[in-house]
Amino acid sequence: MGKVSFSINQPAYGGIPAEQRDIERIFKRAGWQLVKQPTGHVIFFNFAFDALAIDIAARNCYYDSTSDDLLPFDVILLRPCDALRNFLKL
């Protein structure tokens, strides 16, 4: 008694792990701007939605070359607070 368990599932995507160049090209085409920052993580910002997309890496994005679609998963989306906005110089 008192034990906790979690069951998590995600849809299975077709395609292949995305190359960083494909991720950047597709995000930029969709209106996202790559944010240069000191940690080296790949972060995009969308001014129209005032949203950050964090942890945009090949391990979290599949690419379908037949449709030129990116299938991101485990990507973190958030609205930046003032401190984060200042840190990232948004």
Image (cartoon, rainbow, N blue to C red):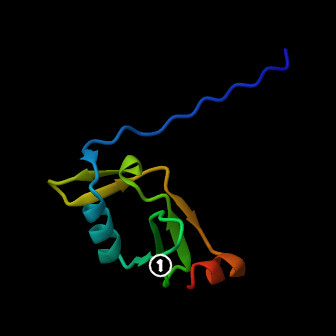
Across and down, in percent, residue 52 comes to 53, 71
Q: Residue at x 37, y 37 (%)?
A: 12
From what the image shows, is residue 5 above or below residue 48?
A: above
> Left or right of 9: which side holds 25?
left
Q: Residue at x 51, y 63 (%)?
A: 54
Residue situated furthest right in the rendering: 2
From what the image shows, is residue 6 above or below residue 70?
A: above
Category of crowding for the residue at label 1, using alpha-carbon neighbours closer than 10 angstroms: few (below 14), some (14–19), many (at least 20): some
Query: Could you tell me the amino acid type at mark 1?
Result: Asn
SS at badge 1: strand
> Residue 23's image quarter?
bottom left
Between 25 and 6, the one lying in front of the other is 25
Across and down, in percent, residue 7 comes to 60, 29
Residue situated furthest front in the rendering: 38
Between 83 and 13, the one lying in front of the other is 83
Across and down, in percent, residue 21 comes to 26, 64
> Left or right of 81: which side holds 23?
left
Name the quarter where the N terminus is drawn.
top right
> Left or right of 45: which side holds 2?
right
Q: Which residue is mark 1?
A: 46
Q: Residue at x 57, y 85 (%)?
A: 89
